Amino acid sequence: MKHRPSSALRDFLTGEAGGAMLLILAAGLAMLFANLPGMAGHFYHDLIHMELGPTLSPKLGPMTVHLWINDGLMAVFFLVVGLEIKREFLDGGLSTWDRRRLPILAAGAGMVVPAIVYLAVTMAQPGLSSGWAIPAATDIAFAIGVLALLGDRAPASLKLFLTAVAIVDDMGAVAIIALFYTHGLDLVALAGAAGVLAVMYGLNRAGVRMLAPYLIGFVLLWYLTLLSGVHATVAGVLAAMTMPIRCTPGAPDAEDSPLHRLEHAVHPWSAYAIIPLFGFVNGGMTLNGAMFAALIAPLPLGVALGLFVGKQLGIFGAIWAAVRLGIAERPAGASWGQVYGMAMLCGIGFTMSLFIGALAFPGQPLLVEEAKGGVLMGSLLSALIGYAVLRLVARRPHHAEHPA
C-alpha cells in the first residue's frame, strides 16, 4: 500500500508545541534586546525599522524590516490560515453544518464578549474605541501549543474543537481587518485586485491544477491589495479560497490535491519562521516602572480583561448554553472542567491581537505599546491558568457527563 503523508492538521496538532516555543523564545529575545542599556538597546529598534526599500505604496513609504514582515510575510501566514479554513470547511472537521454549529457559536460569542468587556473598561477614555477588536482574536499556535504540552491529559476531541473554534475566529479576524481597519481606498488598485482574484477563480473552474499560476496570482493580488488601502494580509486568505482541492473524506491529505500540497509545503515556514519573526519584531516592549504602572491604565487593562475574562465567559457560556438548549453536544470525552480550561486557553491572543493592535492605533506608538502590555498580560494569564485548570481536572478520574 502506497504511503500517504500525514495531513497538515495532524502535524499541527502533534507538533505545534515546538512552533509555540519558538514564538515565545522570539518574543523573549525581543524583550531582552529592547531593554538593553545604551546603544545596544537602540540596536533592536534600529534593526526593525531599517529601510530595505523599495517604496511599494506611497502611504507606507520605504519598506522596512517591520513592514516586510507585518505586511509581506504575514500575508503568507494568512495564506496558510485561508488554506486551513477552506480545507476544514470542505474536507475536514467543519464539513457539515452539524459540525460547524458549536464552533461557530463559540467563536462568535468569544469575539463579541471580549469586545464588550474592552469597551466597558475603556469607554471613559476618548480615542480608545478603535481597539475593540484587539482581545477578540485567538492565537491558534499558542493555544494548541499549550494543549500539546498536556499530552494525553487533553482528549483529542478537545484539540480538534479548539482548532475549529480558532479557525472560525481567524475568519472573523480577517473580516474585521478588511472591514474596520481599512482606510483611504484606491478604487483602481482595488478593481485590479478583484480582477486578479476573478482570474484565479477562473483558473480553478477551468481545472488548472498546477500551483505556479496561483502563486503568481497571489503575489499580484498581494501587491494590488497593498496599493488599494485594504490591509495586504487579506490577500492571503482570498488567494487561498481559489486554490483547487480534491476532497478525500476521512483522509484529507491527497497527494494530487493542490491545496493540500501547498499547505504541507508552506505550513512549516509559517509556524517555524514567519510567526517567530513576527513575534521578534512586534514583541519588543520597554520594561520599566512607568510601564508596569501603566498596565492598570484603561487600554492595557481593557485588552487584558477582554482576553482573560471575556474569552472564557463568551466561549464557555456559548458552549454551555448550546448543550443545555439541545442545540449541540459537548466535545466527546471531555468533561465540563476540560471545556472550561480550553475556553480559557482561547484567551491567548498573542499573534493576532498584537497584529490588530498595530492596526488599531496607526501613528500612535505609545498606545500600541500599551496594547502590547495588555495582550501580554491577558495572554500570559490565560495560558498559565488554563494550563493549570486542564492539568488539575485531568488528574481527577471523571466520567463523561451526558448533556441535559
Image (cartoon, helix red, strand yellow):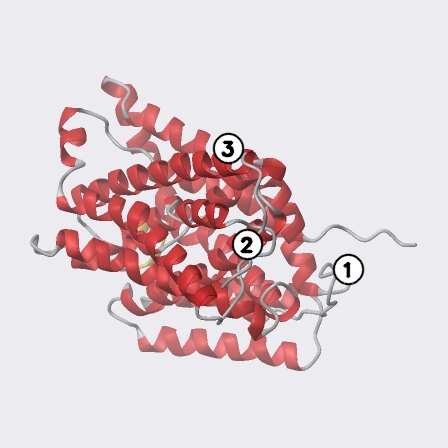
**In the visual, does 187 lie left or right of 389?**
left
**In the visual, does 274 lie left or right of 301?**
right
Q: Which mark is residue 21?
A: 3
Q: Which residue is mark 2?
A: 401
Determine whether the residue tagged by mark 3 lies in a helix, strand or loop.
helix
Residue 120 falls in image quadrant: bottom left
Q: Earlier in the sequence, mark 2 or mark 1?
A: 1
Q: Which mark is residue 255?
A: 1
Q: Earlier in the sequence, mark 2 or mark 3?
A: 3
Residue 356 visible in the snapshot: no
Number of residues whose C-alpha sits closer than 10 Å to that of mark 1, classed few (under 14), some (14–19) or many (20 or more):
few
Q: Position of residue 228 (x, y in %)?
A: 34, 69
Q: Position of residue 91 (x, y in %)?
A: 66, 67
Q: Amino acid at mark 1?
A: Glu
Q: Amino acid at mark 2?
A: Glu
**In the visual, does 156 lie left or right of 300?**
right
User: Looking at the figure, which quarter contains the N terminus?
Assistant: bottom right
